[in-house]
Image: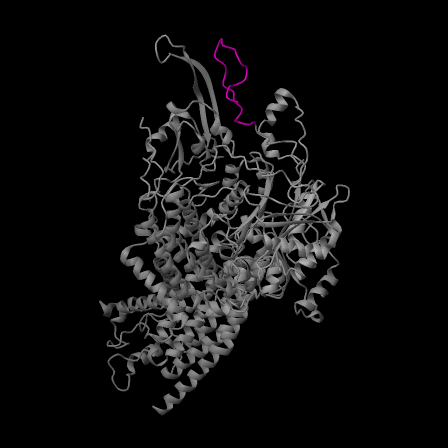
């Protein structure tokens, strides 16, 4: 698998290195979207025979929805969600007790923040998938949300189903949706602070209990070679 | 057959069911007196075959619920051939599975490289106090007798049948 | 603070009044009824705040979150086999069907395909979990409408299928049997014959349901024309599965967009739709789907190819970088997983697209002006499961 | 032995005491037997399961066990409840059941009070339970029980009318209102001259019998008319806030009412305590009467409970339109036909 595609341009992923598979149907679809939205289409990515990603500029987010429903006849609203690309500072929390108790807060090398298919340069990214039952195709739209202004305009007037999904994204990530009729909590109790699905939100269940996987096989009496357990 | 109105057909179904239950017995059994046999592969409780366990901690690391607690110490085992170097082996001090946390997913049994953990279809180990649900090494050993032998596979399968070490 | 922020009350009632045929000049004062988290009609802990005028629902707002276990956060700290055990607890009635899309998405990322025998058995178990799930729906619908006997018949006949699932996977409700690249184990001896007999019993259950319930005039009076959902509104809300096929949309993921890991294209079967779009249509479509699933299982059982059960997969699975979305036709509707992987043991982000979340989001629209008993019928016919909504 | 029984003529207060004792004793025990036999056993057979086995021999004392369980449970009164009305409601419901038994004859003299307008009295008293249910629904200060109570009020009143009209057919054919008179009529009249089987009114009044049974299902709030206690919608309606001893009274009242209506239906349509070939007035019935009556009651109750386990439930407005638009016109038609035939034949 080649590393993630660069921001600009369309790269067709060559799954098997022999022949570069071309997926005409999805490329035609991409042409339609690019023709309609013009330069608002910042990036795109096609996995042949599987899916088409299109990243649009935040301003054209509502226009993309209207075009998908009208031009592409994507009347089926599948889902809308968000991705927080910040690498998690807690890792798998397996050694959290260990590192705090024994090594103090060790500074793991903060891995570089990458973004997935069709690129993306901000921390938060909203993604939505809409499909067409009549024509049998589906498109995954993505848009970047700059860190200082976490607002995207809502899809509710176009797809009524987006109501609950946007409420969930607002609650879990903190991205608010301009024009949403009823932005309240959907899962969490009313007085819940913080946005759980953000990567910097700690998963408390794992920090409270010591990890049973820590190897504490005492050394051989008198051997005293490596202090910690073997087979780490 | 003229279309019997739905209401009458419904009555017929329940009456037929009553006759069938009276004739060849109900489907349910009276639990404490008659017990239904779970299938041999049912995941009732985990049994530990201590000889195979080398305290490699793989199961307690892979367990999603963090409910396997292992403590072991090293000791010098006599060399296999005389004149050979004494081998360093792990002796198991504590191997507890906390069945109040366990969700019976079977990752530990599957991931154990030395086949020390087995499933038994036993399901009657409920306790009054939740603390008693932590089965220690000896209790897990006792479950070993109830482990059924692995069944033969269906025709056309290439998997080989594993054996259960009898203590 | 109630979920609905307290807008100006009179304007609210007046606005709803025009919509729900309320007679304002009688100044009858509406009643807010909490069909609360603890209620027999909600399959689990769903709370519906319904504003009633007498017995008529002026407006209602389902509140979920009482069973929110935060799966998407948990998947951030679990490796792929551990997420499989997590994931089959979402729709716990047809729980093998939850694992399949997650595994297929991981297989798409890794570019691995399971051997034919594994795909065959995976499809058989997928259909068996559909039968187990939807047969309970038929019983439960009878229960919601007052015929307790239906509930007992469903539970009695469902046991045969659950025993078969337990015989091969070890767990009746949480099989945890699907692996990236194949299945955990193979079929025990004599399983195919036993499953044919079990599935035959289910066919008698379907005929019994037909006699006892579908033909019953009272049942038809209670469900025909109740909760009508036109196709375009259903699609805009993202309804899937029997809910949208009940409104005449001929669309089934097993046929139209079947992921590579399942073998639906190898046998011929039929997708059932019904034009009316009311509660009766949705129930009728699900009953035919169970019969169809029974014939699919019988056809597949006759043609299970021999061969390995697991492809060559490294013991420690590191899924290469990339994103994939795979959705399959689960008993409740379309269930899909959007996996974002950064190439290490743990998936970076898993978006779980569950069917009931969208299916229930249409309740405020469809329950306007319905009676309380009709609201219960609509909820029963939409057939959601709480784990599916709250994840 | 029979002559001694006939000669026994106690003073008035003693006989009424015996009669009240008999009614107060017969009704609970009969409800017990009926409850066990039908709800637990037959229901479980119909649902292919065993039914209770632990209490008593093969589970026959299950209702006794339930009764004791309810007795030792704490019966709560919600704090915002209307205390007096809350306490009085179950008594009213149970009282209306006891009063029905006053007129049901187990033999020529084995009847608490042989009132002339017997059936008229029975139906009037049967509608008393509506008040009890409404009291329970209102007093529990709970939204669900309020809805349940209002539904019960609407339903029970709506189904009084078809029940009365169904009975009118029988009364025309028997020529008398008193229940013993009706039993004698059924015993003496023959079918077109052949006196062998007597004339149980079910044969000629089958429409009346069907309407009566439908109306009884509604009076007992049983499926398909169990809107007031629809557990999947309003969580057992007016009984929501009741627990312990008061709920036991409701629970027993339900079976006792079923038994009472089955007794009235048996007397009206199946020939009451009399067998066709033994004259209704003979002294044999002092012993035989109650047994025959019990058998017929079990038969009618089987029908009532059989319908209960099979059908889903109506919606409110369908329930009302079924009563007003279907049952009442049929009952009226039945009266007209019976009247015409009575005159013609």
Q: Is residue A145 left or right of residue C44?
A: right
- Reply above or below: D206 against A5: below
Q: Is residue C92 left or right of residue D282?
A: right
Q: Which one is nearer the viewer's eye here, C255 or A220?
A: C255
Q: Which one is nearer the viewer's eye here, B84 or C149?
A: B84
Q: Position of residue B79 (x, y in %)?
A: 37, 12
- Reply above or below: C322 against D214: above
* Identity of the residue furthest to the bottom in this view: D344
Q: Is residue D60 left or right of residue A21?
A: left
- Reply above or below: C29 against C3: below
Q: Could you tell me which residue is drawn at 69 percent across and 50 percent down?
A: A184
Q: Which one is nearer the viewer's eye here, C90 or D24?
A: C90
- Reply above or below: A193 against A111: below
- Start and end of the magenta stretch? A210-232
Q: Could you tell me which residue is drawn at 48 percent across and 40 percent down?
A: C180
Colour option used: one colour
* Screen quadrant of the N terminus of chain A: top right
* Identity of the residue furthest to the left in this view: D1
């Amino acid at each position: 698998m080649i590393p993630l595609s660069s921001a600009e341009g369309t790269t067709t992923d060559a799954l098997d290195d022999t022949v570069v598979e071309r997926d005409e149907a999805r490329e035609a679809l991409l042409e339609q979207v690019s023709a309609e939205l013009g330069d608002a289409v910042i990036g795109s990515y096609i996995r042949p025979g599987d899916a088409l990603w299109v990243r649009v500029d935040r301003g054209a987010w509502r226009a993309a929805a209207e075009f998908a429903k009208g031009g592409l006849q994507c009347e089926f609203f599948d889902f809308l969600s968000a991705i927080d690309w910040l690498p998690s500072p807690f890792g798998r929390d397996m050694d959290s007790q260990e590192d705090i108790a024994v090594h103090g807060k060790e500074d793991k090398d903060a891995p570089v923040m990458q973004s997935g298919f069709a690129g993306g340069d901000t921390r938060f990214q909203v993604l939505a998938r809409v499909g067409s039952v009549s024509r049998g195709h589906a498109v995954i739209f993505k848009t970047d949300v700059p860190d200082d202004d976490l607002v995207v305009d809502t899809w509710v007037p176009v797809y009524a189903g987006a109501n609950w999904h946007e409420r969930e994204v607002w609650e879990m990530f903190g991205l608010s949706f301009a024009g949403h009729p009823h932005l309240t909590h959907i899962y969490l109790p009313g007085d819940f602070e913080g946005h759980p699905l953000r990567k910097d939100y700690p998963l408390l269940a794992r920090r409270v209990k010591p990890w049973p996987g820590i190897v504490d096989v005492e050394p051989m009496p008198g051997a005293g070679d490596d202090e910690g357990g073997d087979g780490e | 057959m003229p279309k019997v109105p739905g209401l009458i057909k419904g009555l017929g179904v329940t009456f037929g069911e009553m006759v069938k239950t009276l004739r060849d017995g109900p489907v349910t059994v009276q639990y404490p007196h008659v017990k239904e046999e779970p299938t041999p592969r049912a995941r009732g409780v985990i049994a530990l075959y201590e000889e195979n366990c080398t305290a490699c901690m793989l199961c307690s690391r892979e367990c999603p619920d963090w409910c396997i607690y292992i403590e072991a110490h090293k000791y010098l085992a006599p060399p296999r051939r005389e004149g050979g170097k004494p081998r360093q082996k792990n002796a198991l001090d504590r191997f507890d599975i906390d069945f109040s946390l366990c969700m019976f997913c079977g990752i530990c049994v599957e991931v154990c490289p030395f086949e020390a953990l087995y499933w038994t279809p036993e399901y009657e180990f409920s306790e009054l106090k939740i603390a008693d649900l932590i089965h220690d090494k000896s209790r897990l050993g006792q479950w070993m007798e109830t482990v059924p032998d692995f069944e033969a596979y269906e025709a056309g399968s290439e998997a080989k049948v594993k054996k259960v070490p009898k203590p | 603070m109630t979920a609905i922020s307290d807008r100006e009350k009179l304007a609210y009632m007046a606005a709803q009044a025009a919509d729900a045929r309320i007679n304002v000049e009688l100044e009858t004062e509406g009643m807010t009824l909490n069909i609360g988290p603890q209620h027999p009609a909600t399959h689990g802990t769903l709370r519906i705040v319904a504003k009633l005028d007498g017995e008529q629902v002026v407006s209602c707002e389902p509140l979920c979150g009482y069973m929110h276990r935060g799966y998407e956060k948990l998947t951030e700290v679990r490796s792929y086999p551990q997420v499989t055990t997590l994931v089959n607890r979402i729709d716990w009635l047809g729980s093998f069907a939850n694992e399949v899309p997650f595994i297929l998405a991981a297989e798409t990322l890794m570019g691995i395909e399971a051997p034919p025998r594994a795909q065959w058995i995976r499809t058989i178990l997928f259909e068996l979990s559909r039968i187990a799930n939807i047969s309970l729906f038929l019983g439960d619908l009878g229960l919601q409408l007052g015929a307790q006997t239906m509930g007992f018949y469903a539970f009695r006949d469902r046991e045969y299928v659950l025993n078969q699932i337990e015989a091969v996977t070890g767990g009746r409700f949480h099989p945890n049997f699907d692996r990236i690249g194949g299945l955990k184990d193979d079929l025990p001896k004599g399983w195919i014959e036993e499953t044919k007999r079990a599935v035959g019993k289910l066919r008698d259950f379907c005929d019994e349901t037909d006699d006892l319930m579908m033909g019953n005039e009272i049942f038809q009076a209670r469900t025909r024309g109740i909760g009508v959902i036109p196709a375009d509104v259903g699609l805009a809300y993202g309804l899937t599965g029997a809910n949208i096929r009940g409104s005449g949309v001929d669309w089934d993921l097993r046929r139209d967009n079947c992921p590579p890991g399942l073998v639906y294209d190898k046998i011929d079967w039929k997708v059932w739709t019904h034009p009316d779009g009311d509660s009766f249509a949705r129930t009728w479509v699900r009953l035919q789907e169970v019969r169809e699933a029974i014939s699919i299982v019988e056809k597949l059982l006759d043609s299970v190819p021999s061969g390995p059960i697991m492809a060559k997969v490294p013991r420690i699975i590191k899924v290469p970088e990339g994103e994939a979305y795979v959705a399959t036709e689960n008993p409740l509707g379309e269930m899909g997983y959007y996996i974002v992987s950064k190439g290490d043991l743990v998936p970076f982000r898993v978006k779980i697209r569950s069917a009931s979340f969208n299916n229930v989001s249409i309740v405020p629209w469809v329950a306007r002006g319905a009676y309380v008993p009709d609201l219960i019928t609509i909820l029963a016919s939409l057939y959601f499961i709480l784990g599916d909504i709250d994840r | 032995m029979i002559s001694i029984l006939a000669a026994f003529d106690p003073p008035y207060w003693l006989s009424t005491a015996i009669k009240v004792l008999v009614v107060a004793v017969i009704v609970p025990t009969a409800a017990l037997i009926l409850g066990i036999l039908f709800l637990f056993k037959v229901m479980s057979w119909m649902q292919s399961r065993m039914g209770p086995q632990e209490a008593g021999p093969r589970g026959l004392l299950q209702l006794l066990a339930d009764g004791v369980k309810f007795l030792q449970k704490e019966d709560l009164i919600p704090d915002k409840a209307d205390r007096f009305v809350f306490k009085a409601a179950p008594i009213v419901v149970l009282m209306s059941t006891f009063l029905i038994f006053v007129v049901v004859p187990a033999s020529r003299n084995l009847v608490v009070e042989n009132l002339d307008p017997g059936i008229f009295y029975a139906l009037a008293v049967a509608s008393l339970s509506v008040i009890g249910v409404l009291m329970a629904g209102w007093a529990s200060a709970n939204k669900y029980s309020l809805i349940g109570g209002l539904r019960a009020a609407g339903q029970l009143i709506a189904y009084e009318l078809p029940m009365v009209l169904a009975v009118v057919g029988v009364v025309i054919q028997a020529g008398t209102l008193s229940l013993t008179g009706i039993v004698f009529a059924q015993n003496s009249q023959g079918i077109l001259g052949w006196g062998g089987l007597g004339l149980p009114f079910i044969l000629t009044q089958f429409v009346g019998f069907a309407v009566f049974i439908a109306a009884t299902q509604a009076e007992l709030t049983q499926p398909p008319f169990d809107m007031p206690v629809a557990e999947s919608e309003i969580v057992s309606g007016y009984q929501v806030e009741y627990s312990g001893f008061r709920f036991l009274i409701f629970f027993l009242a339900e079976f006792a009412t079923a038994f009472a209506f089955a007794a009235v239906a048996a007397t009206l349509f199946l020939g009451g305590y009399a067998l066709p070939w033994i004259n209704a007035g003979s002294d044999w019935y002092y012993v035989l009467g109650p047994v025959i009556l019990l058998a017929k009651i079990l038969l009618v109750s089987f029908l009532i409970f059989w319908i209960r386990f099979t059908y889903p439930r109506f919606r409110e407005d369908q329930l009302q339109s079924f009563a007003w638009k279907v049952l009442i016109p049929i009952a009226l038609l039945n009266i007209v036909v019976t009247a015409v035939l009575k005159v013609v034949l």
